[in-house]
Amino acid sequence: MSLVGKKVMPFKANAYQNGEFLEVTEEDFEGQWSVVVFYPADFTFVCPTELEDLQNEYDALKEMGVEVYSVSTDTHFTHKAWHDNSDTIGKIEFVMVGDPSHTLCENFDVLIEEDGLADRGTFIIDPDGVVQGVEINAGNLGRDSSALVRKIKAAQYVRNNPDEVCPAKWEEGSKTLKPGLDLVGKI
Amino acid sequence: MSLVGKKVMPFKANAYQNGEFLEVTEEDFEGQWSVVVFYPADFTFVCPTELEDLQNEYDALKEMGVEVYSVSTDTHFTHKAWHDNSDTIGKIEFVMVGDPSHTLCENFDVLIEEDGLADRGTFIIDPDGVVQGVEINAGNLGRDSSALVRKIKAAQYVRNNPDEVCPAKWEEGSKTLKPGLDLVGKI
Amino acid sequence: MSLVGKKVMPFKANAYQNGEFLEVTEEDFEGQWSVVVFYPADFTFVCPTELEDLQNEYDALKEMGVEVYSVSTDTHFTHKAWHDNSDTIGKIEFVMVGDPSHTLCENFDVLIEEDGLADRGTFIIDPDGVVQGVEINAGNLGRDSSALVRKIKAAQYVRNNPDEVCPAKWEEGSKTLKPGLDLVGKI
Amino acid sequence: MSLVGKKVMPFKANAYQNGEFLEVTEEDFEGQWSVVVFYPADFTFVCPTELEDLQNEYDALKEMGVEVYSVSTDTHFTHKAWHDNSDTIGKIEFVMVGDPSHTLCENFDVLIEEDGLADRGTFIIDPDGVVQGVEINAGNLGRDSSALVRKIKAAQYVRNNPDEVCPAKWEEGSKTLKPGLDLVGKI
Amino acid sequence: MSLVGKKVMPFKANAYQNGEFLEVTEEDFEGQWSVVVFYPADFTFVCPTELEDLQNEYDALKEMGVEVYSVSTDTHFTHKAWHDNSDTIGKIEFVMVGDPSHTLCENFDVLIEEDGLADRGTFIIDPDGVVQGVEINAGNLGRDSSALVRKIKAAQYVRNNPDEVCPAKWEEGSKTLKPGLDLVGKI
Amino acid sequence: MSLVGKKVMPFKANAYQNGEFLEVTEEDFEGQWSVVVFYPADFTFVCPTELEDLQNEYDALKEMGVEVYSVSTDTHFTHKAWHDNSDTIGKIEFVMVGDPSHTLCENFDVLIEEDGLADRGTFIIDPDGVVQGVEINAGNLGRDSSALVRKIKAAQYVRNNPDEVCPAKWEEGSKTLKPGLDLVGKI
Amino acid sequence: MSLVGKKVMPFKANAYQNGEFLEVTEEDFEGQWSVVVFYPADFTFVCPTELEDLQNEYDALKEMGVEVYSVSTDTHFTHKAWHDNSDTIGKIEFVMVGDPSHTLCENFDVLIEEDGLADRGTFIIDPDGVVQGVEINAGNLGRDSSALVRKIKAAQYVRNNPDEVCPAKWEEGSKTLKPGLDLVGKI
Amino acid sequence: MSLVGKKVMPFKANAYQNGEFLEVTEEDFEGQWSVVVFYPADFTFVCPTELEDLQNEYDALKEMGVEVYSVSTDTHFTHKAWHDNSDTIGKIEFVMVGDPSHTLCENFDVLIEEDGLADRGTFIIDPDGVVQGVEINAGNLGRDSSALVRKIKAAQYVRNNPDEVCPAKWEEGSKTLKPGLDLVGKI
Amino acid sequence: MSLVGKKVMPFKANAYQNGEFLEVTEEDFEGQWSVVVFYPADFTFVCPTELEDLQNEYDALKEMGVEVYSVSTDTHFTHKAWHDNSDTIGKIEFVMVGDPSHTLCENFDVLIEEDGLADRGTFIIDPDGVVQGVEINAGNLGRDSSALVRKIKAAQYVRNNPDEVCPAKWEEGSKTLKPGLDLVGKI
Amino acid sequence: MSLVGKKVMPFKANAYQNGEFLEVTEEDFEGQWSVVVFYPADFTFVCPTELEDLQNEYDALKEMGVEVYSVSTDTHFTHKAWHDNSDTIGKIEFVMVGDPSHTLCENFDVLIEEDGLADRGTFIIDPDGVVQGVEINAGNLGRDSSALVRKIKAAQYVRNNPDEVCPAKWEEGSKTLKPGLDLVGKI
C-alpha cells in the first residue's frame, strides 16, 4: 500500500528560510497545501537546478496557497551555508528542511539506508495533511516543476469540486467529468 | 526505502493485447524499457481518458524501445470485454494485464487492501528490470503521458551517457551536466 | 468442520442490481432466505449459462422469500458493464456483488488464491444468517438451479416443522418423517 | 480455499461390504471415479432413506465406473449390524466405511467436533484422487442421488473432452461449449 | 499421577437405558456410587459377555447404591440397536453411554487414538465424584464383575468407617484394621 | 491413552530379595511374565497384608513363569530392614524394589507428587515388556491376588492362542471365543 | 549465592519423635535455634553413628535452646521402625523428619537427584528462620557434633552481642572482637 | 543438588604466595588434595584470625599432601599489600588468590551479589578435583582449622580404603566400618 | 550513544575519606560538581601517581565547588589500608569509593569483565547529576589533572553563561563565543 | 565495557582532503597511529575553532606518524564546501570524513539519535587498529589539541617500551616507571 491517501506521520525538524532558522512539524501541513521535495545532498550536481526550477514556480505556488519544503539529510546549518554561497541556491525563498536524524526520510520511505541520503521524492499534501501525490526518480534524473504545478491545480480543483474528477492531461479550466452510473462503460 | 533502484519481483499474469490473450512475467522486462501503469478498475471514470492519453504516446514509446503495460485487479476477460465495448479503450494497442490475485499490485506496493483496487501508480523500468521512476496519484487525479515520455527519454539518455546527469526540466537535446569535484558548490 | 450450521461472517461489498449500485452486508441476510452463488469471472464461458439458469428460477425463489446474490472477484462496475453488454446477463434481476477485495470469497472459503478467482460455490442461508447448504463444483462443471430450489424448499419445510425431517429425494408435499426413539433402527 | 481441486489426503479405514470386512485407503481412489458420502450415524432417521436412494443408483454408477463409499463415525462392526438388521440398509451393496478415529471426517473437513459426528457431505473424486465436487447439507436435509449422478456424468464428460465445458443444467448428450477467445462476453 | 483420588472432569453425553434416551453428565455421579465401564465397540466379541457379566451383578450393585455406566465410542443410537438386536445385550438394564466425540474416553485417559476406540477400563467413583479404583486390561482380556463388586464393597466400608482400612482380600464382614502408631512395623 | 499396550520405559533400581541386594532394569522384563506391584510405604498398615497375600500366590506365579516385583519409594535398605523385622514381610520371596528417586513411580504414572508415595497400582507385563493390565486402587483399599492370577492366566492363554479371545470371568480351561465376522452382533 | 543469610522456604512434613507422629513446618523454626541434619537413608552404615553422636549432644543443645531435626527421604513410618529396631537409633530423642516428597532436600539444595537421597548436609538456623551455617560432606564422611555445638554457641553469642564478632576457633567465654575502623588492617 | 561430588569448574586467577605472583587454575587441583577457603575481604576483622588459624595448620596440611588456597574478591596486589603490612597475615605461607572478576566465587556459589564479597565458605577437594566437603558460615562466625584437618584426614582415609566408611567423630587411627549387607539395620 | 548528557544511574557504595567510612549514592551528585575517577586497582603502579596528581588539584577543585570521587573494584577496607600504608596515597583527602560489586563500573560502562577491574575513566558530572565529560585511557596511560581542571572550568562557565560556547583551548577569562545565525559559516 | 582496548569495527566512508574526494575504511588504521575526532556539524560554532586547533598540531602529529580524521554526519560534499568557503576550515589538511549514514558514529557509540549528530568524541587508535584513548565532551565544550598530543606521545612511548608505564602528567622525556612486584604498595 502506497503513502497516497495516508496522513503524514509526526516529525520535528530544523529548517532554514529567508535568513532565519525555524522549526517545522507535521502540524504546519494542516490548513495549507504543501509540497515536500527530497533530494540527496547539498552542494551536489542535479540538485541545484531542480531546486532553482522549483523556486521559479514558487510565486505561482504561493498564490495557489502552496508552501514548499525541500529536504535533505544535511543540517539546517549546511542549508544556510549553501544558500549563502551558491548563486543558484541563494535565490531560494521556500523552506529548506534539515533531516540529519533521517526521521522525515523514513516517514516518507525515501531513505537510501547504505548512503544515508534521500531518494528524489516529491510529495503533494492536501490541507488535511494527507498525501495526494508521490513521485520518485532515480538519482540522476531531474524533476519538472511545471508538471508538479499542474498536478497540484488538478488536486485543488477536485478537492473544491468533490463531484467531479479530472481526466488525464487536465489543464486548468478544461472540462472535467462528473462520475455517475450512466458513465460506466460509456467512455 | 522506495522501489527506485530495486529489481521487479517475479510474477506471472494473464493479459490481453490486440485480440489475443498472453502471459506476462517479469522476464519480459529484461532487455527493453517498460512502463507499468496501474489504475483502479475497468469501466470507470478517469481511467479511460488516462489510458487513451497513454495510447496516444504509444507509437512514440515503441520507437523509443518502450513497452507499455496497464494493470488493474480486473481479469484479462474483463479487459477484453472493455476493449470490445468501449470506443476509447478499443483503440488501445498496449498490453492490458489482469491482476485479480493482487500479485503485481502487492509487488509494486499499490494495493488498496480494503478495496482490492490499485492506486494510480506509474513505474518506469529499465532494460535490467530495475525501477527508475515511480509516480502515484490519489484516485481522482489523471496522469499526463507527455511528462512520462520526457522522463523516460531522460532516463535513457543518462543510461547511455553514464558520465552525465540531467538537470531539472531537461528536454531531449538540451545540455546535461558532467559531475565532477569542481562542480561541487559551484552551481 | 464445514460452514454448515455457522453464521455468515461480517462483510461490506458494492453490488449492481436493476441499473443501480447498492451496498450489501451480512445484515441483509437477516430475516430472509438467501442464496449466495460464487463464480470465477464475468465475461467467461460456463458462468453466463449458470447465471441465466438461476435467473429463470428467480421469480419462484422471490415468491419463496429467497434473495439471490451472485459473487465474483470482479468489481460492480464490471458487473454493470457485463449486464449492459450481454443479452444473457442483461436479463438478470438478482443482486450481482463485486468482491475485488476477496473478503466474501475468503469468508466462504472459496478463494483460489493463486488465481484470485472464486470456486463455483453455492450457499443456502436461512433467515438467521446461518448456512444450511453448501455446494462447490470444479471450475468446468455447471450447476442446476432446480436442484437448488428443491433443497431450499426442503430447508424451509424443516425450519417451519422442526419436529419432522426430510428423507432423501423429498419433493414439496411428499411425506416427511417425525424422528422418534421407535424409529431407530426400524427404517 | 475449498477442497475442490485438491487431492484426497492419506487414510486407512475398516469397512463393510457384501458380508466382508475390508480395508480402504486413499489408494483405492486412484484409477476409478469415487463418491464419498458422509452421514451422521447408523440407526438414525434421514440416513437410511438417503443411503437407500444412493443404492438405487448404485448399478448405474458402477456402470459409469464409479465406486461409492458411505462414511460415518460408527465402526465397521456397527455397519455390519445395521446391514444385518435393517431391511433398508440390508440392500446396500456399496462400501460402508467406519471412521471412529475421525480421520476421514477431518480430512474432508466435515467433523462436527462437539458431537463426534459427520456433516452430510458428498464428495465426487476423479481417477486422480482429486475432488471435483462438494455438497454439504444441514443435518435434517436429505440428498438427491439423481442430481449426484448428473454431476458425475458431467464431470466425466469434461474429463474426456478437456476442450469443452458444461453449461448449467447439462444433461448427458446435450450440447456443451468449447471455450475460446471469441466466446468471451458473447454469451 | 493416576486418576485415583481425582474428581471426574465435566462432560455431557447421550445414553440409552431401558428403552429411553437420556443425557448423562458428571453431576449424575454426585451422591451415588458409580461404576464406569469402557469397552471398545458394540457388536464385537468379548464385549457382550463382559457386559452380560456386569448385568448379572446389576441388582446387587443397585442395592449397594451403585449405578453402572457402560461407555464406548459408539452412538446411543447404536447402543439402542444393539440392545434391540442382541439377546445378550437386550437384558442390560444399566446406562449405555455413547461417546462418539471421545470426550469421556479422553477424560478417563482410555482413548486409543489411532483406532478411535476405548481401552477396557473400569472406574469406581465415590459419591463425591472422586475416582477410587481403576482397572484397565489389554483388548482381548475379559473382566470379572464379582471382583469389581468386592472392591466397591470394600471402598464403601472404608468410606463409612474412615478410621479403618481394608487389608488384602477383604470380604464383606471380615475383619478390618484400625491404623495406628502401634501397628507400624507390627504386622 | 493408558499404559496398556505400551512398552515399559527404561529404569535402573536397587532391590532386595532373599537376603541379597540386586539391581533391576527394564531388561529383566524381557522373556518372562512380570507383575509390578506398587504400594505407598514400608512399615504401614494395609501394605503388609497385601504383600503377604501376593507371597501366598508366589509359587503358583513362578510356575506360570511370572516374576513379581513390589515397589515403593522406600530404599532397598528399608526393604531389608522391614523383611528382617516383620514376620509377615519376612516370608516374602519375590523382588522388593526401592524407588527413592521416583523413577519407576513416574514411569508407571503412579506417583502422588505431594506425598512422594506411590498409588496402589498393579501392572501385568508380558514377555515383550508390554503392559497387558493395569489396576490402581485408592490408598485404603487392599488388592486380591487371586484375581490377579486369573488375569495373568487369561493373558497367557490369549498370547498362546492369538486367534481366540477370553470372555468375561474366564477361568483356566473354560471355553474361549474365536473372533470372526459371523460372531458380530450374534452374541 | 549460598543459603547462608537466607530464610528457610516453606514446607510441611511428617516426623517421628518420642513415640509420636507429628507435623513439622518452617514455622517451627521461628523463635528457637534449629539444626537440620540431612543423611542419605535409614538402616545404613555411617548414619546411625552420626545420629547417635548428635543425640549425645542433644541435652546440651536443648539447654542452649536448640531443636534438632534429622531428615532423610525415608518416611516417618520407616523412621519409627528404625527407632523401634535399632539400639543406636532407639536412643534418639530429637525430631526425625520424613521427606519422601523431596521437598526439604530440594529447599536445602541437598538432593542427589539420580539416587533420590540426601547429601550429608547440616544447617544451623537462627530464631528468625535464617540459615547461619551450612556444612555438607561427601557420602562416606561422618560429622562431628561437638564442632557443631561450638558453632551454634558462637552464632548465639554474636546474635546476642551484635557489636562483636568471633575470631576463628572461638570457644565460649573466650575474647571476641569489636569491629571498628581502627581495627582495619591492624590485626 | 550441592557441589559435593562435583568437579571444580575451570577458572584462571592471579595469586600471591611467598613474595611471588603466580597464576592458579583448576588444573592445579589435579593430583593433590586442596582446600579452598573463601573470606569476605582483606583488611577486615574476623578474617585475619581465621587465616592465621589456617596458617597454624599449614605445615601439617602440607605433610598430608594438601595445598591451601585462600580467596577473596580482592586483587593479588591487595593480598601482597596485606601480607606486607599485617603481622598476622605476614606469616601466611599458603596461596592467596585474587578474585576481583568473581569467577571463583560464582563457581563455588558463594558470591553475595549485592556486596561483591564472598561468603565464608571452605571446600575440600580431592586429587581428582572433586569436592568432598563444603562448609559455609554466616559473615560473623569464625572457622576452626582443626575440625578441617580432621575432616581431610577422614576423607583421605576413605579414599585410600574404599571398602570402609568413617563413622561420626572419627579420629585418625580409630576404628572404621566396612559397609555390608549384614550391617544394614544392625548398628 | 555515549553517557554524555545522561543522568548518573542510582547506586549505593561504601567509601573511605579522611579516616572515616561513609556511604555514597547518586544523590550526593545533586547540587555540586563532581568528578568520578576510575582506576584499576589499589597498590598498583600508575594509579598512585594519578591519584596524587589529582590530590594536588583538590584544593582548587573544592574552591570551584567540585567534589572528587576515586573508584576501583577494591573495598573501602582496602582503600583505608592503602591510605594508611602509602605515603603517596596517605595525602589523599577526596572520597575513595569501593566498588567490589561492580555496580558503579557497570553504570559508567568501564568494567573490564574478564579482569573484574575498571578502565581508567574520568567523568565530569554537573550539579544536575548529568555527565558533561568522559575520558578513558588504556591501562598504561596516566591522566593529567590540570587538563581536567580546565575542562571543568569551561563546563562551569558555559553552565553559568548559557548563551555562550567555549571554543577549543579555552582558558579561564579568555574570550568565548555567542552562537548566532550570523556566525554560521563565518568562522 | 568501554571501547578502550577494542578493535575498530569495519566501515566504508567518503571523505574530503586537500581538494580530493577519497574513500576511507578501517583498514587505513592498520600500520599507523590515528586520531578520529567527531563533531556535531559543519558550519557551526565551536567546531571550527576545535578543528583549527587540531590543524595547528597536524604537522607535529604527522611527524609522530599520526593521521587525523575529523568526522561529522555531513556529507563529503558539504565538507568540501565548508573547506572552500571558510578561512578557518580552508587551512585544514587532514581527512574530513562524511558520515551521513551514521555508520561511524554508531561504531564509536557517539550518535545522538534524536538529532542525527555526533557527540564531541576523540579516539586515539594504535597501529593495530585498537582504541587506546577516548574523550567525549558535552556539546558546548571545546577540546584542547595539545593535551591530545601529549596523550598520543605517552601511548607511543608505552607501546615502544612495553615494560614501562607512564605515571600521571607524563611529558616526553620525563621518567617512567617499570612495573614490578617490589613496587606494589611502595609508591
Image (spheres, coloured by chain):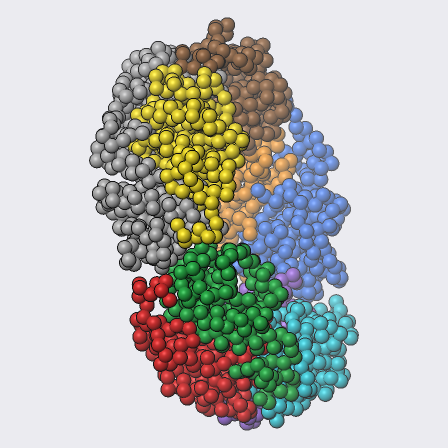
Chain colours: A yellow, C green, D red, E cyan, F purple, G blue, H orange, I brown
- Residue C152 percent across, percent down from the top left: 55, 74
For residue E175, above or below residue H186: below
Residue in the picture at 35% in, 74% down: D176
Q: Quadrant of residue G82?
A: bottom right
Judge by depth and name the residue closer to the eye, C52 or I41. C52
Q: Is residue C100 left or right of residue C163?
A: left
Judge by depth and name the residue closer to the eye, C83 or E160. C83
- Residue C18 percent across, percent down from the top left: 50, 61
Q: Quadrant of residue F114?
A: bottom right
For residue D79, above or below residue I13: below
For residue D86, above or below residue H5: below
Judge by depth and name the residue closer to the eye, G177 or E18. E18
Residue F104 appears in the rendering: no
Residue in the picture at 45% in, 20% down: A17
Residue in the picture at 76% in, 45% down: G31
Q: Quadrant of residue F142?
A: bottom right
Image quadrant for the C terminus of chain I?
top left
Q: Is residue H114 left or right of residue H26?
A: right
- Residue E79 percent across, percent down from the top left: 61, 84
